[in-house]
Image (cartoon, rainbow, N blue to C red):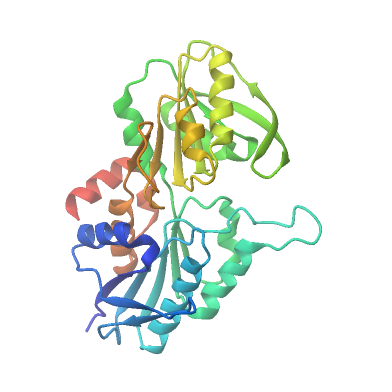
């Protein structure tokens, strides 16, 4: 008898998990996160998962309770004799700590990988890691989904006449180059210099933007400062329009204010992290279909690679 699929959610990704389960065609599993008066909590599965293929959906954005909750869910599933435990992490927190870039600092993304494995995860499904090499921190399989499957169809329907893609910093160039190549479009780079975290000292544009419809591509939008500054600079250089596509809407600090006061036409994000509130300039696209297909393919031992080609993704969505 093949193991059954059961999908559960942590408190941080409840809304997205419900959409993933609905698209997959299975009810969201019953779990209770018991809270204690001192702030401690304990996940309790309210149904048997013995011998089941268990998928635990939880983005590990701040605060760290979301990460701790996921670790406890994994441990509980392991002790309840689940057949396989897959951590579905739409947004992988601490990913910006991917190397020792200065003395005496932690490598947070490696520590999180170690904790997930120690807790008992058999596999990880995630999306748009800040640094793709984080996959090498794991000794278990990692399915690294690409938001281009979500963004490319959206860009196509915009039908922009003078499409040019922009990387808001040098670290985003590979991600932007792949999408620009798909559209056979030009790309430019906004080279920035920081004095300290979340504070930009200077920025210059490398490339021609006059009369172009610019789309900035990045994996995260934190305070929105980089996007706002890049958009303003691109307009000053003669860009016809500027919009931004970012996978993970962290949107901390004055992010909403920065985006709404910027020259951006719009900021398009995914629902890997729940929005704090709505904004007239921010549009959300769902990753539920993509993760539902990834879960099905992982369960049926089918290829995940096909999800990186958006035309094949559409065909698979129709058959799901």
Left or right for 205, reference 261: right
Q: Nearer the viewer, residue 158 or 70?
A: 70
On screen, residue 238 above or below 134: above
- Position of residue 201 measured from the top left corner of the image (x, y, whole percent): 72, 32
Write down the quadrant of residue 6 in the picture: bottom left
Image quarter where the N terminus lies is bottom left
Left or right for 282, reference 191: left
- Position of residue 99 measured from the top left corner of the image (x, y, whole percent): 69, 56
Residue at 20% x, 67% y is 26
Work out whether residue 138 can be spotted: no
- Position of residue 223 measured from the top left corner of the image (x, y, whole percent): 55, 41
Residue at 74% x, 57% y is 100
Left or right for 83, reference 320: right
Q: Nearer the viewer, residue 129 or 203?
A: 203
Q: Given the current orientation, which residue lies at the most extreme front position?
A: 37
Left or right for 300, reference 217: left
Residue at 58% x, 34% y is 226
Write down the quadrant of residue 57 in the picture: bottom left
Number of numbered labels in the structure image: 0
On screen, residue 289 above or below 187: below
Image quarter where the C terminus lies is bottom left
- Position of residue 81 measured from the top left corner of the image (x, y, whole percent): 36, 88
Work out whether residue 151 can be spotted: yes
């Amino acid at each position: 008898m093949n193991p059954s699929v059961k999908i559960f959610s942590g408190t941080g990704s409840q809304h997205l998990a419900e959409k993933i389960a609905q698209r997959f065609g299975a009810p969201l599993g019953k779990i209770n996160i018991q809270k204690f008066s001192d702030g401690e909590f304990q996940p309790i599965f309210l149904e048997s998962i013995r011998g089941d293929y268990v998928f635990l959906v939880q983005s590990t954005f701040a605060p760290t309770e979301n990460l701790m909750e996921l670790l406890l869910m994994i441990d509980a599933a392991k002790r309840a004799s689940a057949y396989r435990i897959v951590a579905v992490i739409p947004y992988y927190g601490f990913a910006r700590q991917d190397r020792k870039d200065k003395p005496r600092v932690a490598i947070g993304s490696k520590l999180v990988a170690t904790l997930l494995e120690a807790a008992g995860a058999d596999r990880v499904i995630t999306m748009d890691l800040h640094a793709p090499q984080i996959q090498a921190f794991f000794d278990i399989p990692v399915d690294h989904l690409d938001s281009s499957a979500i963004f490319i169809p959206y860009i196509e329907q915009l039908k922009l006449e003078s499409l040019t893609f922009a990387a808001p910093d040098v670290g985003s160039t590979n991600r932007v180059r792949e999408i620009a190549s798909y559209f056979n479009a030009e790309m430019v780079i906004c080279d920035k210099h920081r004095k300290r975290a979340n504070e930009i000292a200077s920025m210059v544009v490398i490339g021609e933007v006059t009369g172009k419809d610019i789309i900035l591509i990045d994996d995260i939008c934190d305070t929105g400062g980089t996007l706002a500054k890049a958009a303003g600079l691109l307009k000053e250089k003669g860009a016809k329009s500027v919009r931004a596509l970012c996978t993970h809407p962290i949107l901390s600090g004055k992010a909403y204010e920065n985006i709404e006061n910027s020259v951006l036409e719009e900021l398009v994000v995914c629902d890997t992290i729940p929005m704090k509130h709505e904004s007239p300039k921010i549009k959300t696209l769902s990753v539920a279909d993509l993760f539902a297909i990834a879960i099905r393919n992982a369960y049926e031992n089918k290829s995940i690679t096909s999800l990186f080609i958006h035309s094949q993704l559409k065909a698979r969505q129709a058959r799901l």
